[in-house]
Amino acid sequence: MCGPAPGTAGTHGADRAATGEMRMRSGQDSALLRRRAALERQWARWVPVREAPETDAAQPRADVAQSWVRSRAFVDPATDCAPAVAGDVASKWADSPLRAPIAELSDQLHSITHDAGFVAAVTDEAGTILWSDGGQVMRRRAERVGFTPGGRWDENHMGTNALSLALHTGRPSSVFSAEHLVEALHGWVCYCAPIRAADGRQLGVLDLSTTWDRSHPLAMSTVLSLTAAVEAKLQGGVANTAAGVRLECLGAAALTRGGRPLRLRRRLLEILTLLALEPDGYTPERLQLAVYGDRPTGSSTLKADVSHLRRATGGDISNRVYRLTTPVSCDATEMLAALAAGDTATAVRLYRGPLLPGSQTPGIVEWREHLEVGIRTAVLSAGEAEYALDYGAKAPGDIAIHEHALRLLPVRDARRAVAAARLHSALRS
């Protein structure tokens, strides 16, 4: 019989997972530090002048640079706090159509802000914060810069930030560190999406913000899921997704439109999955690498595939940066949002298996590993035997998971037989 001894497999498996996670976190921290340093250099060169430099080898994102130019005429980069609007903000929030949906999501928002170290905010259509929530540490940070009810966060009052960009463009936006015009915000990263009424009117924005070193792509997925939930409540429970398109990519590949199956080539499903998992989108060069790897493939092939995907799904995909301008309902993004909110029960329920099993597309392989590390870590960190049993059914070879289930199950629990049988099979394989 091969494999580690029953008494040590779980410990060694958990140690390997922890070591891998620490290495991943260390690499992410280094990348974030380099990104912040590069943005600080760009900010120092661009922001002090009224017009953009004619040439710059390392230019900021186009939407950020344009916002810098627009807002620099009104906002001093040395501003240290958002101005407050005059009037009774509490009464305005009480009358807002957003108050009831946000109240219904209060438990989920509270979990994100207090357990994951974020501060959340909702604005009106003009960019004035009407509601906010956060843990004690982040709330104090937010108060110092006026990120509280009554604070005005449009471009004319606080320059470039995720809230002002989402208000201006009508699209989800994230702003990292020195992409903020105001220097006092360089220690922040913000993720934001507009909230629309049933008739398409923009009612305000929902924002999640934290310190720059906690930047994570899951945060944008969480914002999009929360925004979709708010809009669904505003529309009587009908989620605002692209033409009723539903993508199932965990454990299998299935696409429906209006409840009816939609057949697509595997390559198109892979591209749609990547776009769903990356709300900020891909540059053409990055998407080409994620889809085709190092194989010699012309850009016209990618353009044709994206064009076909647009026609098949009825969804809108932007061009300069390939991005789903209307989110697609997707089980993988919902699982990511559940993990970010600390909702392990929902994440385990949604996880039916690896992302697009069998796909060797580089971007899919990378995301598959990311999702598996996330769900596995959540299960091993939880004290619920049900999570380990449910996840163990989808990961039959995971010795540490089956041992974790056995440790948590009471001695007389009949389900121990299931966990023991799975462990036996995993040790033999």
Image: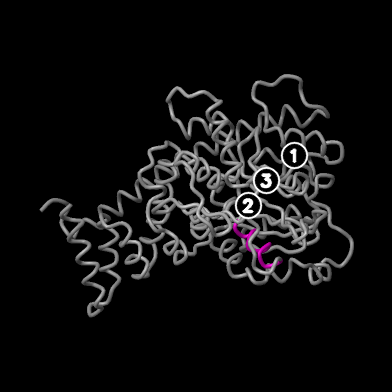
Say left or right for 308 vs 204.
Answer: left
Quote the CA–CA distance across marks 3 and 1. Answer: 15 Å
Tell whether label 1 touches label 3 (CB within 8 Å).
no
Seen at 80% across and 54% down, the residue is 127
In the picture of the structure, the residue carrying the numbered disc 1 is: 181
Decide whether residue 229 is among the magenta residues: yes
Percent of width and height locating residue 215: 56, 46
For badge 3, the amino acid type reads Ser
Disc 1 is placed on an element classified as: loop
Q: Nearer the viewer, residue 268 or 395?
A: 268
Percent of width and height locating residue 4: 17, 53
Crowd band around label 2 with a 10 angstrom C-alpha radius: few (<14), some (14–19), many (20+): some
In the picture of the structure, the residue carrying the numbered disc 3 is: 173
Crowd band around label 1 with a 10 angstrom C-alpha radius: few (<14), some (14–19), many (20+): many
**Which residue sits furthest right?**
86
Disc 2 is placed on an element classified as: helix
Residue 422, placed above or below residue 322:
below
Seen at 42% across and 41% down, the residue is 366
Q: Which residues are magenta?
A: 225-234
Quote the CA–CA distance across marks 2 and 1. Answer: 33 Å
Crowd band around label 3 with a 10 angstrom C-alpha radius: few (<14), some (14–19), many (20+): many
Q: Nearer the viewer, mark 2 or mark 3?
A: 2
Q: In the rendered structure, which disc, 2 or 1, sits on the residue that comes first in sequence?
A: 1
Residue 229, placed above or below residue 126:
below
Q: In the rendered structure, which disc, 2 or 3, sits on the residue that comes first in sequence?
A: 3
In the picture of the structure, the residue carrying the numbered disc 2 is: 242
Mostly what secondary structure, the magenta segment? helix
Seen at 47% across and 34% down, the residue is 291
Name the quadrant containing residue 285: top right
Q: In the rendered structure, which disc, 3 or 1, sits on the residue that comes first in sequence?
A: 3
Seen at 56% across and 26% down, the residue is 300
Disc 3 is placed on an element classified as: strand
